[in-house]
């Protein structure tokens, strides 16, 4: 058996030792839910990440990593919209030359509702007006370069391998949670039976 397959098998057994499958699979991915990286997920793109799912269906999955801040502000990407108040996060490794917005200001930005009161998308012109008129609370806007994407069936396979926990607590965590605390708080929001996971090392051999 190839070494990579042996590693994945060992990884899955380790994860399932700590996670009761009956608890981790009752929630399935859906638009507006969170993917929380399992403690030992070592992929550098997603280790200890929390991903907001904005589209989920037969054609695949799109989401944005919530706890990968960059040193960039909106004005670094669009100098004509200079503003020191809108930080930019890395939404994922796909199409890093694209800019996306998740917000709580549909009356000025538009977009598609992904959970009650939270919207994905909006036009450049609308964002321009928000900045020029200072017509929206910066805390209600989250900007991302790139996105996280899965082809049909790919995310389901990763769930089967134990790579992710699924949460429906996005509304209470999306805005106002410090990036450094996002993963821990997301795990703890699943309930007391999961709280011990928030303190586990990234390497299972160190536990």
Image (cartoon, rainbow, N blue to C red):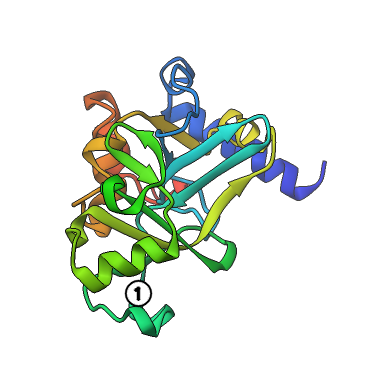
Q: Which residue is mark 1?
A: 74
Q: How would you rate the neighbour count of disc 1 (Cα within 10 Å): few for under 14, some for 14-19, many for 20 or more?
A: many
Residue 15 sits above or below residue 177 on the image: above
Q: Residue furthest right?
A: 1
Q: Residue at x 68, y 35 (%)?
A: 59
Left or right of 174 in this view: 101: right
Residue 20 at x, y percent in the picture: 43, 20
How many numbered marks are there?
Answer: 1
The answer, for residue 143, to whether it is visible in the render is yes
Q: Residue at x 23, y 49 (%)?
A: 175
Q: In front: 174, or 43?
A: 174
The answer, for residue 73, to whether it is visible in the render is no
Residue 83 sits above or below residue 13 on the image: below
In which quadrant of the rendered view does residue 24 lie?
top left
Q: Residue at x 33, y 44 (%)?
A: 200
Residue 191 at x, y percent in the picture: 24, 26
**SS at circle 1:** helix
Residue 36 at x, y percent in the picture: 41, 40
Left or right of 167 in this view: 108: left
Quadrant of the rendering where the N terminus is positioned: top right
Residue 139 at x, y percent in the picture: 19, 57
Left or right of 53 in this view: 69: left
Quadrant of the rendering where the C terminus is positioned: top left
Residue 186 sits above or below residue 102 on the image: above
């Amino acid at each position: 058996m190839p070494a990579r397959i042996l590693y994945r098998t060992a990884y899955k057994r380790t994860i399932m030792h700590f996670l009761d499958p009956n608890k981790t699979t009752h929630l399935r991915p859906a638009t507006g839910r969170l993917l929380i990286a399992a403690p030992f997920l070592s992929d550098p793109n997603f280790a200890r990440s929390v991903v907001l799912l904005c589209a989920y269906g037969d054609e695949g999955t799109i989401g944005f990593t919530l706890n990968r801040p960059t040193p960039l502000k909106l004005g670094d990407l669009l100098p004509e919209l200079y503003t020191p108040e809108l930080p930019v996060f890395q939404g994922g490794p796909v199409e890093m030359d694209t800019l996306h917005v998740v917000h709580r200001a549909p009356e000025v930005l538009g977009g598609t509702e992904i959970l009650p009161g939270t919207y994905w998308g909006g036009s450049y012109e609308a964002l321009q007006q928000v900045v020029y008129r200072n017509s929206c609370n910066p805390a209600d806007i989250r900007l991302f370069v790139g996105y996280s994407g899965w082809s049909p069936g790919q995310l389901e396979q990763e769930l089967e391998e134990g790579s992710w926990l699924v949460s429906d607590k996005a509304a209470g965590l999306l805005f106002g949670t410090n990036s450094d605390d996002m993963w821990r708080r997301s795990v703890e929001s699943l309930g007391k039976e999961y709280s011990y996971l928030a303190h586990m090392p990234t390497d299972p051999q160190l536990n």
